[in-house]
Amino acid sequence: MAIRPILCLPDPQLRAVSEKVGVVDDSVRALMDDMLQTMYDAPGIGLAAIQIGVAKRVIVMDLSKKGEPPAPRFFVDPEILETSEEESVYEEGCLSIPEYYEDVSRSARIRVRYLDRENIMREIDADGLLATCLQHEIDHLEGRLFIDHLSRLKRERAIKKFTKAARSEPGAKKFERAPEIREKRG
Ligand code: GNR
Ligand code: NI
């Protein structure tokens, strides 16, 4: 098991469409273990594989409250079978968009088919936080982020803020400005 670095906005990998897994084998379970450890360390309540740079349709989640025993959940190749007309609003955050929170409206209830950790096909009816979190994570598998559900103004502000921040971080080479510009800024 290993804690892996979480990719952040504006990393273009977060926009990748993840590939179907097909069969949950030991290699997928090893990925899930790393994802779970990474999620607990962050800490977060859900994580999609693309957030650690793996473009596979794998999600881990734990919605247990503080003081409750851990309740890890695993969803592979999830498919939304039904969505309610009724929506509910939840203030969302994302480990790939740190310290940014906004209300998002999504289907209040969904039915999802997926493979579990033992490669067994299951279906669940989700509501409340589980429905919100599943939709947030399934969006990641399609390269979508929760800011895509906001107004264009809010989305572009968020992207701009994180692009600017990434440039001034020493580790974020991919998004750095040309060296001569950085030197001028000290
Ligand atoms: O930790 C997380 N909290 C959260 C809160 C409201 C709605 C969705 C989430 S998921 C998020 C972790 C994450 O980024 N998963 O992709
Ligand atoms: Ni997220």
Image (cartoon, rainbow, N blue to C red):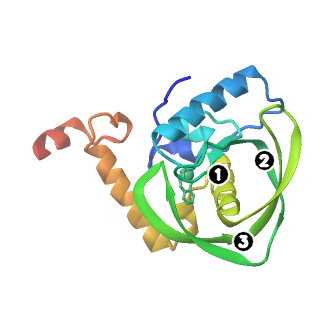
Q: Nearer the viewer, residue 166 or 97?
A: 97
Give neighbour class at mark 3: few <14, some 14-19, many 20+ (Cα, 10 Å).
many
Camera-near label (3 vs 1) is 3
Ligand 1 placement by image quarter: bottom right
**Residue carrying label 3:** 108
Q: Residue at x 57, y 50 (%)?
A: 45
**Residue carrying label 1:** 137
User: Image quadrant of residue 29?
Assistant: top right
Residue 53 appears anywhere in the view: no
User: SS for tag 1?
Assistant: helix
Q: Amino acid at mark 1?
A: Glu
Q: Amino acid at mark 3?
A: Ala
User: SS for tag 3?
Assistant: loop
Q: Residue at x 82, y 31 (%)?
A: 118
Please give the label number shown on residue 78: 2
Image quadrant holding the C terminus, namely: top left
Residue 22 position within the rendered picture, expressed as x and y whole percent measured from the top left: 83, 33
Picture layout, residue 32 above or below residue 131: above
Sequence-wise, which precedes: disc 1 or disc 2? Answer: 2
Give left or right: position of 77 versus 142.
right
Residue 23 position within the rendered picture, expressed as x and y whole percent measured from the top left: 83, 29
Between the C-alphas of marks 3 and 2, the distance is 17 Å
